[in-house]
């Protein structure tokens, strides 16, 4: 048999897109997931890179079945395995699938999710137009009534809000990408069915861990360029954010603001846990009397539009005059 590129032979075309799929005990979803790879309408060169992380169910058999079907239609399948008794985790499995892949672009697909047939084609088109960018898409949830507010929020973020509000699950990867000057774009079509269930890897990440990294990112990316700011929420979330800030950034907090007259009437928030003497006392005022910039700790789409109306009346610019931390 001739070597690639040798006389009488032709080199294999480079792989344009590698679909990266980490797998652990995914037999109840994996058929539909891999079928969605098989159904892609992308006409370029594509491969499936899948890493089976110590599955004890029938995932391996399903992978082998779809390897045959995919390679029949010209999609190479690379399979890696962790054969130990203990899984190494979804991050490890993703990294191993990336290492063994050869595509110019990586398309991440969780084993419990399903791609629409046009996903790879449309996201690849945008990726070519916007080098050094993470390219996302709109999604729909299954069950349909799960995380309705969250799904509505992520599907309606503007291009600018992808940077000022978008907080994905792969938090550290996303933050590192932005810190290195990368960009974020979204294909405004629903290209992914995202399942919500108790076994999802999302639930394995501690809320405190996510909070810690979000605060550090806020301090590095936003607060480092502000000399003072107001925390919009004098309640539990606003005070939690204040307590989580570094001492230097705590000193930048000029006030809390709110609409709750009970909180405003108190006049001050005293930071009892502070080792400073006297203990810091931060004024609490009505939002109309507060000075921007704001760090907003109010969840969107929960007040029947009242909060959004209050914010709009101030005619502020997101990313400059305020930043959502909710």
Image (cartoon, rainbow, N blue to C red):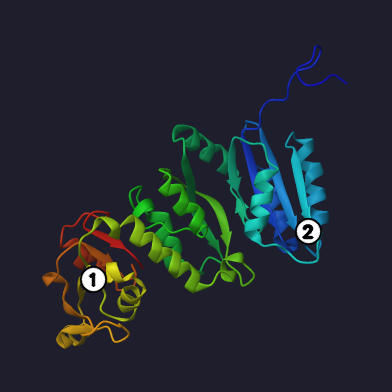
Name the secondary structure under disc 1. loop
Image location (x, y in percent) of residue 117: 60, 44
Furthest residue to the top?
A: 7
Q: Residue at x 61, y 72 (%)?
A: 198
Residue 133 lies left or right of residue 86; in this view the side is left
Image location (x, y in percent) of residue 320: 23, 54
Discs 1, 2 touching: Cβ within 8 Å:
no
Image location (x, y in percent) of residue 156: 38, 55
Q: Residue at x 64, y 44 (%)?
A: 19
Furthest residue to the right?
A: 1
Residue holding disc 1:
251
Q: Residue at x 69, y 50 (%)?
A: 96
Figure quadrant of residue 45: top right
Q: Is residue 44 visible?
A: yes
Q: CA distance from mark 1 to mark 2?
A: 53 Å
Residue holding disc 2:
59
Q: Closer to the camera, 119 or 164? A: 164
Q: Residues within 10 Å of mark 1 (few under 14, many from 20)?
A: some
Q: Which mark is residue 141?
A: none
């Amino acid at each position: 048999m001739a070597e690639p590129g040798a006389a009488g032979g032709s080199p294999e075309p480079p792989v344009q897109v590698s679909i990266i799929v980490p797998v652990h005990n995914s037999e109840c979803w994996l058929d539909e997931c891999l079928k969605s790879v098989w159904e892609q309408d992308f006409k370029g060169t594509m491969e499936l890179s899948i890493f089976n992380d110590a599955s004890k169910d029938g995932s391996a058999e399903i992978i082998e079945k779809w390897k045959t079907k995919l390679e029949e239609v010209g999609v190479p399948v690379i399979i890696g395995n962790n054969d130990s008794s203990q899984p190494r985790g979804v991050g490890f499995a993703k990294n191993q699938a990336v290492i063994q892949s050869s595509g110019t672009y990586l398309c991440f697909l969780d084993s419990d999710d399903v791609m629409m047939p046009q996903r790879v084609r449309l996201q690849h088109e945008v990726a070519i137009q916007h080098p050094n960018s993470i390219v996302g898409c709109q999604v729909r949830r299954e069950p349909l009534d799960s995380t309705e507010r969250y799904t509505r929020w992520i599907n309606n973020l503007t291009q600018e809000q992808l940077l000022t509000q978008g907080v994905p699950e792969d938090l550290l990867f996303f933050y590192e990408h932005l810190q290195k000057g990368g960009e974020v774009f979204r294909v405004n079509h629903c290209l992914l069915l995202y399942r919500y269930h108790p076994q999802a890897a999302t639930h394995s990440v501690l809320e405190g861990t996510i909070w810690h990294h979000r605060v550090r990112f806020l301090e590095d990316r936003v607060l480092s360029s502000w000399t003072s700011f107001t925390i919009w929420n004098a309640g539990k979330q606003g005070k939690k954010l204040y307590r989580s800030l570094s001492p230097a950034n705590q000193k930048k907090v000029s006030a809390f603001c709110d609409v709750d007259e009970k909180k405003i009437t108190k006049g001050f928030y005293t930071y009892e846990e502070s080792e400073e003497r006297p203990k810091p006392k931060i004024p609490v005022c009505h939002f109309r009397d507060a000075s921007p910039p704001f760090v907003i700790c109010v969840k969107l789409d929960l007040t029947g539009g009242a909060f959004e109306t209050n914010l709009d009346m101030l005619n502020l610019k997101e990313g400059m005059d305020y930043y959502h931390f909710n």
